[in-house]
Image (spheres, rainbow, N blue to C red):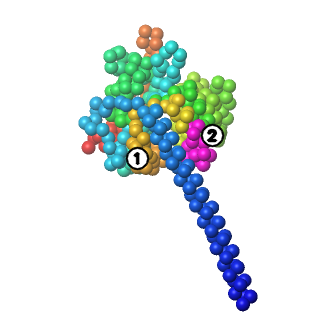
Amino acid sequence: MVKEKRTDKVKSKKRKVLKWVGITVGLFLLAIAGLVAKVYFDAKNTVENVYEELDKSELREVNVNVEEQEPISILLLGVDEREGDAGRSDTMIVVTVNPETKDSKMLSIPRDTYTEIEGHGMDKINHAFAYGGIELSRKTVENLLEIPIDYVVQVNMDSFKDIIDAVGGITINNTLAFEYGGSNFPEGTITLDGDSALNYVRMRYEDPEGDFGRQNRQKKVIQGIASSAVSVDTALNYKSIFESIEDNVRVNASYNELMTMQKNYKNSFSSIEQLYINGGNGTKIDGIYYYVPDETELETVKSTLKTHLELNS
């Protein structure tokens, strides 16, 4: 009889423990659900605030369909905006993404590239933004590479550091020791905050590879941001990240498109091949420096990008 009472007491304690565990787990799940819902609405609002509508590329008969996992192209414009000035695109990077081959191609276009800008004749490619903003920059890149640009992301370079600080900094492997803008960059694994990352990508003249070495550093920083953006600390600091994005970014992709890309294209960003336009010559025209691409090399890059976008078939 005593044994039965003890058994009942043990069972009763177990039921109470299980009850409290159930309540605790339930509250935890509710908290998680609440956080996800909060992130969802904040993320959706952020994308709506940074959205900038662009016409369909003239090189596409119809817009790409990310639901069907078609290859896409993205132009990243790092814009140097100054007070009283329309600004110039300090950085121009084209990325093509193919979810079937599960890889991406990345091309950094030298800012001084001598090319045709619609309505303005031959000029430096980075002047296209000053003449006509995102739309003319896209058309100029399309004219140079002969591929459609589906999405354009404009980032304010001066405030670029805010995004890096919001994700808690980035870690990269640096292969060139140098100092620039008051920041010191030793060889090896280094951690960069926003200010030092901006100095890291802006240095050109001390790099033995010139603008092409700078392109490689830009790639490292972009990959560093992508890595930091998926960390737990970053997830908990999402509000600051969203605020930085709203202040510094413009993009012509809707929230649903971005979420679909994240789902269908994320594996393609794990393998990125860097392409180069570095076989040309620097020259001065009327006392102004320009970079004139090598035609053979440029044709090879065009063909590679077209094939990756499945435009040759």
Where, quadrant-wise, is the C terminus in this rendering?
top left
Residue 237 located within the stretch drawn in magenta: yes
Q: Residue 216: x, y in percent? A: 52, 35
The secondary structure that most of the magenta stretch takes on is helix
Q: Which circle marks residue 260 in the picture?
A: 1
Q: Nearer the viewer, residue 307 or 241?
A: 241
Q: Is residue 229 left or right of residue 53?
A: right
Region rendered in magenta:
228-241
Residue at x 60% of width, y 57% of height:
28
Q: Residue 24: x, y in percent? A: 63, 61
The residue pinned by badge 2 equals 168
Residue type at numbered disc 1: Thr
Q: Secondary structure at mark 1?
A: helix
Q: CA distance from mark 2 to mark 1?
A: 26 Å
Residue at x 57% of width, y 42% of height:
238
Q: Nearer the viewer, residue 44 or 152?
A: 44
**Neighbour tally class for label 1: few under 14, some 14-19, many 20 plus, Cα within 10 Å:** some
**Neighbour tally class for label 2: few under 14, some 14-19, many 20 plus, Cα within 10 Å:** many
Residue at x 40% of width, y 49% of height:
264
- Judged from this view, the residue extending furthest toward the bottom is 1
Q: Residue 271: x, y in percent? A: 47, 47
Residue 165 visible within the image: yes
Q: Nearer the viewer, residue 208 or 158?
A: 158
In the image, residue 247 sits, relative to residue 258, either above or below, namely above
Q: Secondary structure at mark 2?
A: loop
- Label 2 with label 1: CB-CB less than 8 Å: no
Residue type at numbered disc 2: Gly
Q: Is residue 206 left or right of residue 75?
A: right
**Corner quadrant of residue 124:** top left
**Corner quadrant of residue 296:** top left
Q: Earlier in the sequence, mark 2 or mark 1?
A: 2
Residue at x 28% of width, y 30% of height:
58
